[in-house]
């Protein structure tokens, strides 16, 4: 069983990685918003999902889009009030939506498919599937075959199918961005001198520093342990910003010159870069578990 000093060392290092992974995620989020990366990925996926294919380039619909009977299904969906109302601040002439709730998607999709009908029925929905591309008609037909005549079950089924497709999209998006996060992690590690090897050595040698950092880590872990998974990063960021600034983390530049950098420091930066690219939720989960071992 780990001793108290070893537990504090582990907790302290996890906390260091958590704090600076928040810095990396903040930078990445700023870049993502500026480039509308998630929004672009969402609308490309929707074009493929609803229209049976997507062209190259920016797939996002314009905010002033007008639709008619011949418009693509994705354009009709965007023009639906349930989807259009999700837009927030106007930054350019294209959609900035990066997420569509499954309930809004399913209700909006059913409405645009059975457009012109006063009441929605599963039978009418099935009849309207004939004009859709195979890539959309087949999964929707499979869903309608399972729900009988219950429209609410149809909405739930379409929502679950959409959530599954968006989860797959998120996995692909994370895979695409892993190298971006590594590069950002390396920039943060070098810029702020987050040397994982040196940080571990400082915590190991300095009992007071180790105990203080570990206690702050436990405070953050306990403050956010009851949050929903989607809210953990925001809670952690706030908890870290509210910490006592008198406790110094074992990182940062002092009077060291570039000529003093050696192979061990470079290795420490690389270890930190890999660690920081894992994301704050990953390190928070490990920190929460490790903090439970501290007495």
Image: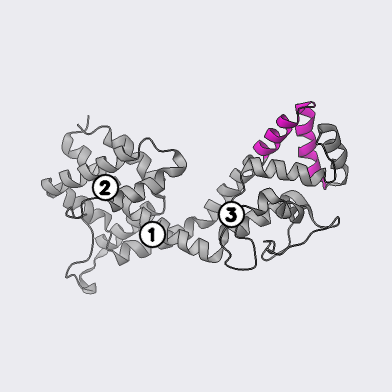
Name the spot of residue 153 as percent of width and height, x first: 71, 29
How many circles with numbers are drawn on the protein?
Answer: 3
Magenta stretch, residue numbers: 133-161
Q: Which residue is mark 2?
A: 13
Q: Which residue is mark 3?
A: 98
Name the spot of residue 18 as percent of width and height, x first: 33, 49
- The numbered mark, 1 or 3, whose residue comes first in the sequence reads 3
Q: Main secondary structure of the magenta part?
A: helix
Residue 228, compared with residue 63, is above or below; it is above
Residue 240 is labelled as none
| Quarter of the image where the N terminus is located | top left
Left or right? Give the position of 212 relative to 17: left
Name the spot of residue 179 as percent of width and height, x first: 48, 59
- The numbered mark, 1 or 2, whose residue comes first in the sequence reads 2
Between marks 3 and 2 in the image, the one whose residue lies nearer the viewer: 3
* Whole-number angstrom distance, CA of label 1 to CA of label 2: 16 Å
- The numbered mark, 3 or 2, whose residue comes first in the sequence reads 2
Density class for disc 3 (Cα within 10 Å; few <14, some 14-19, many ≥20) is some
Residue 185 is labelled as 1
Element type where label 2 sits in the image = helix
Element type where label 1 sits in the image = helix
């Amino acid at each position: 069983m780990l001793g108290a000093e070893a537990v504090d060392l582990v907790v302290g290092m996890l906390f260091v990685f958590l704090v600076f992974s928040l810095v990396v995620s903040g930078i990445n989020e700023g870049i993502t918003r500026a480039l509308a990366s998630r929004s672009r990925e969402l609308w490309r996926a929707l074009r493929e999902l609803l229209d049976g294919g997507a062209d190259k380039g920016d797939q996002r619909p314009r905010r002033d889009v007008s639709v008619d009977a011949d418009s693509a299904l994705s354009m009709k969906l965007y023009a639906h009030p349930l989807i259009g109302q999700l837009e927030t601040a106007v930054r350019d002439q294209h959609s900035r939506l990066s997420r569509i709730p499954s309930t809004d998607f399913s209700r909006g999709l059913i409405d645009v498919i059975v457009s012109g009908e006063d009441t929605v029925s599963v039978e009418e929905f099935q009849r309207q599937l004939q004009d859709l591309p195979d890539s959309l008609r087949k999964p929707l037909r499979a869903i309608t075959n399972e729900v009988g005549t219950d429209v609410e079950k149809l909405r739930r089924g379409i929502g679950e199918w959409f959530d599954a497709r968006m989860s797959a999209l998120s996995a692909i998006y994370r895979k695409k961005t892993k190298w971006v996060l590594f590069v950002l992690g390396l920039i943060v590690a070098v810029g702020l001198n987050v040397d994982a090897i040196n940080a571990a050595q400082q915590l190991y040698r300095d009992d007071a520093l180790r105990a203080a950092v570990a206690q702050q880590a436990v405070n953050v872990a306990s403050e956010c342990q009851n949050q929903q998974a989607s809210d953990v990063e925001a809670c952690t960021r706030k908890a870290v910003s509210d910490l006592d600034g008198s406790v110094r983390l074992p990182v940062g530049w002092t009077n060291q010159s570039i000529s003093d950098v050696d192979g061990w420091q470079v290795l420490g930066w690389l270890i930190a870069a890999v660690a920081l690219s894992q994301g704050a939720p990953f390190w928070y989960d490990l920190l929460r578990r490790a903090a439970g071992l501290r007495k």
